[in-house]
Image (spheres, helix red, strand yellow):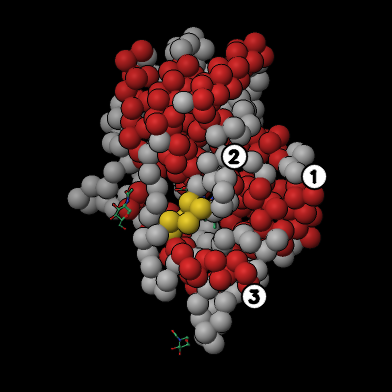
Amino acid sequence: MADIQKLVSVFVAQLLLVLLTLDFTTNAQNLQVGFYRNTCPDLEHIVAMTTYNYISRAPTLAAPLLRMHFHDCFVRGCDGSVLLTSTAKNQAEKDAIPNLSLRGFEVVDAVKSAVEKKCPGVVSCADILALVARDAVLLLHGPFWEVPTGRRDGRVSLASEALRNLPPPFANIAQLKGMFASKGLSVKDLVVLSGGHTIGTSHCSSFTNRLYNFTGKGDADPKLDQNYVAQLKNKCKPGDANTLVEMDPGSFKTFDEDYYTLVSKRRGLFQSDSALLDDIETKAYVTTQAITHGLTFAKDFAESMVNMGNIGVLTGRAGEIRKKCAFVN
Ligand code: HEM
Ligand SMILES: *[C@@H]1O[C@H](CO)[C@@H](O)[C@H](O)[C@H]1NC(C)=O
Ligand SMILES: CC(=O)N[C@H]1CO[C@H](CO)[C@@H](O)[C@@H]1O
């Protein structure tokens, strides 16, 4: 109970701070903080309250909601395509392999219906998802950032594109840099956004290849701390597809800077996490955040989330404003 009260007070304090400091800056992609200030002035309040209602009851929903925004943005830009449901003729992104653990669609749908009641046909699902992801991070004591809005919703969602555009957990540093660069994101964005793995859980299947028979000699990934390998083997037996493991053990429900301490101790869960030690720039960032207890991480994460939120957005008259997030109009 005390925990929830603390959450509420942090949340309300942040909200007030925002209302006091709102500035309406524009950026290159035409997204704008306060885009809906005339057409849906209560938007951010409605999103915050609805998101809070869900996450205060089920804190583990915060992480998949952050991840959902990432998956949306990396496939066809942040256009809400991740929210669309498959049809008889089309397998949507949602049903691609990397979707495995995407959850929380009901939160986005609930926010959308609450928003539709106040301002019908005005606010895109892509914007709602960007706002929900921000509020989810904030509710786990992460940073606040102002979310530029004005995205429109796409009409296309293809499972095959999810596979091609989302980095797999076994990606090496060259692949990761390439995939982020292809979205207009920098190496710094890569190492900063990877810090999203400070919250949430992973299925064993996303990393058991590192524990058993990594090179075909019955061995483990040498880039992983061998004590950690032993712990993980206890949790994940070969072939286990269901068990969930905390990515930042002990504080997977707190958005903190532990991720960098873990990675620097060779305890990053995925090969993609360990890979951040294979490049001079990303390694320097990991080490610095680990040593300084995340001196700049919160601010960096806020900036990189805005960068990610700009990927391939539809604006102006492109796309549509969906009535229901799971279906095109
Ligand atoms: C850099 C490349 C990335 C790779 C290879 C990657 C891969 C993964 C994988 C494999 C999982 C576990 C899925 C499962 O087995 O359940 C996961 C979880 C997660 N990822 Fe990433 N990810 C990346 C970047 C990001 C970014 C940019 C964000 C957000 C800023 C993010 C946020 C999350 C979160 C919050 C979870 C936990 C989800 C939950 O608790 O259900 N990831 N990621
Ligand atoms: C490990 O991999 C090698 C080569 O792929 C294979 O021959 C061997 O049967 C595997 N061992 C186990 C225990 O899966
Ligand atoms: C949440 C979600 O939509 N999960 C789907 C992911 O894709 C598989 C098939 O690949 C579906 O069975 C799941 O329902």
Query: Which amino acid type is shown beneath numbered disc 1?
Result: Thr
Secondary structure beneath disc 1?
A: loop
- Residue 60's place in the image compared with 179, above or below, is above
From the top left corner, tell me how far across and down residue 235 is, in percent. 46, 64
Of callouts 1 and 3, which one flags the residue occurring earlier in the amino acid sequence?
Answer: 3
Q: Please give the name of the residue rendered at 64% of the width and 23% of the height, measured from the top-left corner.
A: 26
Of callouts 3 and 2, which one flags the residue occurring earlier in the amino acid sequence?
Answer: 3
- Residue 274's place in the image compared with 210, above or below, is above
Residue that numbered label 2 is attached to: 255
Query: Which amino acid type is shown beneath numbered disc 3?
Result: Pro
Q: Nearer the viewer, residue 312 or 264?
A: 264
Q: Is residue 9 visible?
A: yes
From the top left corner, tell me how far across and down residue 186 is, in percent. 69, 48
Quarter of the image that includes the C terminus: top left
Q: Is residue 110 left or right of residue 184?
A: left
Q: Quadrant of residue 34?
A: top right
Local crowd at mark 3 within 10 Å, few (<14), some, or many (≥20)?
Answer: few
Local crowd at mark 1 within 10 Å, few (<14), some, or many (≥20)?
Answer: few
From the top left corner, tell me how far across and down residue 295 is, in percent. 77, 39
Q: Is residue 144 left or right of residue 84?
A: right
Local crowd at mark 2 within 10 Å, few (<14), some, or many (≥20)?
Answer: many
Residue that numbered label 1 is attached to: 292
Residue that numbered label 3 is attached to: 222
Secondary structure beneath disc 2?
A: loop
Q: Is residue 290 left or right of residue 177?
A: right
Q: Please give the name of the residue rendered at 44% of the width and 41% of the height, measured from the top-left corner.
A: 60
Q: Please give the name of the residue rendered at 56% of the width and 49% of the height, measured from the top-left corner.
A: 250
- The CA span between labels 3 and 2 is 28 Å
